[in-house]
Image (cartoon, rainbow, N blue to C red):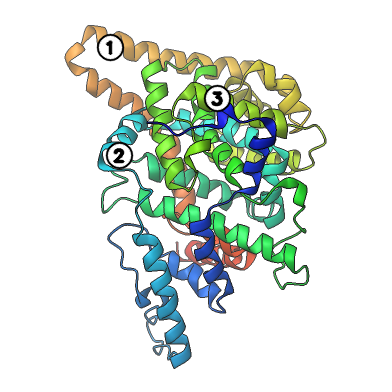
Amino acid sequence: MSNYKADKFSDEEFETWRYKMDDRADAVAKELIDSHHHYHIYRALSKINTLEDPIDIRIFHNPPKPGEEPKIYSKEDIAEHERLATILNDYFNDLSLMPTPEEQEVIIKGSLIFNDSPSECIIALAVRSLLKQYAAYKATNVLVATQLLTGYPHRRILETMQFVIDVMDINGFKPTGRAVRSIQKLRLVHALIRARILAKQKDPGRNDLSISMIWEEEWGLPINQQDMIFAVHTFSVEVLDGLIAAKEDVSDETIESYYLAWHYIGRALGVLDPINPTTYSQGKALQERIYSKQFVKDNPNGPALAKPLMKFMEEVLPFHPSDRDILAIVKIYNDEKDYEPVFKEILGLDLNKSSIVFGWLMRTIDSFWHTLIKLLHRIFPLKKEEFDKMLAMKSHSMIQRIVQMKITWTSTAFQVADGFGQEAARDNEEKKRDLKSKR
């Protein structure tokens, strides 16, 4: 039985959810941030990627490189590492919010659309979900405050896409899968960012140069419950609506299955039941309500965040598109009602300047492939599965390109640098340079 109640909230009650966070994760984050070994925690967490990975003091102690002497740790360091390992072990072993085996089956069913059309879903995520997320003023102040999207745009965008790939993997919730740990790490990232922003707000002189501004009370609390469900809906509602806008064949059953999958993922990320819808129609109505409050013209965050994403799309797509080509893709995956008020007035993207020829070509090629597959289904019904795989392989080419970009950055595992600020981001940058130099 659903405990969803937000559709009955008055505006005043709905606003109070901007002042609710995630108590369990926040308590863990405070313990980590307050430790003078917090930078070691970032590197330790990079070793926790599947349910089979050990979580003990070993995650803090790296084996020496060839030719190096083993590092000698003081008794105080060892004691603190053991304390932190215990905190992390307790956090990661708490699976109470994770999907049950029955709910995991729902997620697998819902993920079929992503696994059948991964590039379409990823494009929808990029040119619709993330762009509309960047148009929301209050929610995006976190991204501006931490400087990580503007300072390290590719890594931040790739992390988002890696998270989606992890949780949509049909084997993601198995012991060797990455879904559970990626969800837990993202939840912890959010809590770590909240802890750092609020600490800076309480003590503006705090030595955390990664936080670029003092948080304003009128924005609510950072990454609050309202912002959390808003973000989950960019992965669910907006991806579905992007596919529909692009004229993809999406059945009502597929829509509900995919949405429910993200309901369970949202709960595991710490979204509370009263604000976590269970049906697509409820979710869409809630998202529109949030947009009505957060889409404002005087939003300096929008253009600053949209520009790095557009540049990323130019680099990740295999055919080296121009600015006008990218605008054409944005136009295909979005609704005409948003062209002027959202994309032009808030994000500074004039979709009327998009390439008409490129847009037509994209739609024609996509229509050709789907028509061809449907025709082959009719002629050779016994080989339907083979033809569907052929379509999926065509779609997987862009995913492989993204994965390769991720490998040249650090690894294919979901990372947590966002939670530890620019020091951790720079560490990732150094790893990237080291990897490139070895190739």
Q: Nearer the viewer, mark 2 or mark 1?
A: 2
SS category of the residue bearing label 1: helix
Task: Check the picture and name the quadrant holding the N terminus.
Answer: top left
User: Residue at coordinates 73% horizontally, 72% vertically from top-left?
Assistant: 206
Kindly report the distance in space between the C-alpha atoms of the residues bearing marks 1 and 3: 35 Å
Task: Check the picture and name the quadrant holding the C terminus.
Answer: bottom left
Figure check: 117 above or below 313: above
Amino acid residing under circle 2? Gln
User: Residue at coordinates 45% horizontally, 25% vertically from top-left?
Assistant: 279
Give the mark, 3 or 2, whose residue is nearer the N terminus. 2
User: Which residue is disc 2 drawn over?
Assistant: 104
The residue carrying pointer 2 sits among few (fewer than 14), some (14 to 19) or many (20 or more) residues within 10 Å by Cα, namely many
SS category of the residue bearing label 2: helix
User: Residue at coordinates 61% horizontally, 31% vertically from top-left?
Assistant: 9
Give the mark, 2 or 1, whose residue is nearer the N terminus. 2
Query: Where residue 165 appears, x then y in whole percent?
Result: 41, 42
Query: Where residue 15 appears, x then y in whole percent?
Result: 67, 39
Which label belongs to residue 284? 3
The residue carrying pointer 1 sits among few (fewer than 14), some (14 to 19) or many (20 or more) residues within 10 Å by Cα, namely some
